[in-house]
Image: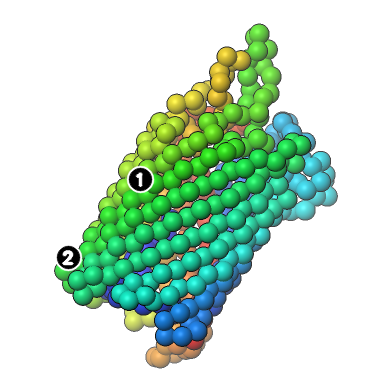
Amino acid sequence: MFILIINSAAIDYAQSLPANETQVNLSSYFDSFNVTVVYPSISVNRRISESTSLTGGYLVDMISAASTKGYKAVPGVDVVTSASDKNVTAKKDSPLFGEIRHQLNIGFAQLIGSGILSFDGLYSTEHDYTSSTIIGNFKNYFAQQNTSVELGIIKSWDMVFPSTKNWKKDRNVFTIDLNFSQVISKQMVVQLLTTYSEKSGLLSDNYLLVPVSVFGIDSLFDPVHPSLRVRRAAALSLKYRLNDKSSIQLGYRYYRDSWDINANTFSVGYQRYLSENIILGIGWRGNIQTKAFFFKPWYTNSDHYRTVDIKLDNGHSNELQIDLVLSGGEKQNFLPFLEDKHIQYILNLMLYSRHTGSPYWFNNLKDLFAAGINIGIRYRY
């Protein structure tokens, strides 16, 4: 989900630790392929000294999707989402959400000289997948805090063990981010964001079987992807304060990887104070990408790599994001639930569309339409 990253109409890059707060979110996603995802979460941040803070969070992903019409490649596995029931076999009385993932994270942030050092650890588990992730980040400020350089390193160790297979395989990710921010004036900030990432191991989804023509007869085979994927991306962001009540953000991102996928992403966001305690944000993001070198509408037995992952096809997408933030405080008689200055309500709405060059293999559709909504409550103390 695309979230506007302009958090206030004013531009402020002062060095500081996260505030003491607890936030609860209830988020959901649903699309025209009959996929529904609900993911409630809670996060807590607490300063234990003037220079140290601790963070913690918990999230649950619950996925549900309708079965494809008359076709179930693997019993108990939904071929739309690749989610699988724990009991493998599909039953009429199965729970509404066939796939549930739990994620726990803990971390801390430490002021060091003119910079902030943070470490976070995440662990997520579901019945056919586990993931352990360590995130390190250091951001340092220069030139009276008008310039900042940020280095982030992410390392993940995943284990994949599909319900329909009798094996376990690794999937590992290493990512390094190097970002630069410069305050040009009281109204303008420019950011340069760069990313390098390597994914290795089992990179295919083995719930999605690929039709392959063998001696003129179509048969179903496991997908085969290259075991290494190197990703590179660079982005430029411009944040400009129009006046005391509004700001605008313009962004461009170029992406390429070792699977020959190239993508160009454009974004624009606008944020405005409707009152002292109400902020409205509107943003749009568009993306155009090419396909992976091994993506084909159909395969023969002579093909070494094969996939039905539509995300590896060429296509374009559009996303609209609307954000509303209501902050508590004085003089809120017209909104009694905002009288407490410690409370903040957050509403995010996302509308998304995607078009691919080839139709999705199970429903013969090239267009996906989706929507998402998040309702959050933040309590600052």
At 28% from the left and 70% from the top, the residue drawn is 141
Position of 356 compared to 72: left or right?
left
Question: Is 332 above or below relative to 306?
Answer: below
Residue 118 vs residue 194, the one in the foreground? 118
Residue 133 picture quarter: bottom right
The percent coordinates of residue 344 (x first, y second) are: 47, 78
Mark 2 or 1, nearer chain start: 2
Q: Position of residue 223 (x, y in %)?
A: 61, 29
Name of the residue lying farthest toward the top: 215
Give the answer, above or below, for where 210 lies relative to 182: above
Q: Which residue is mark 2?
A: 184
How far is disc 2 from disc 1 in space, using C-alphas?
Answer: 24 Å
Q: Secondary structure at mark 2?
A: loop
Q: Which residue is mark 1?
A: 233
Q: Amino acid at mark 1?
A: Ala
**Mark 1 Cα-neighbour bin, 10 Å: few <14, some 14–19, many ≥20:** some
Looking at the picture, does residue 127 appear above or below residue 21? above
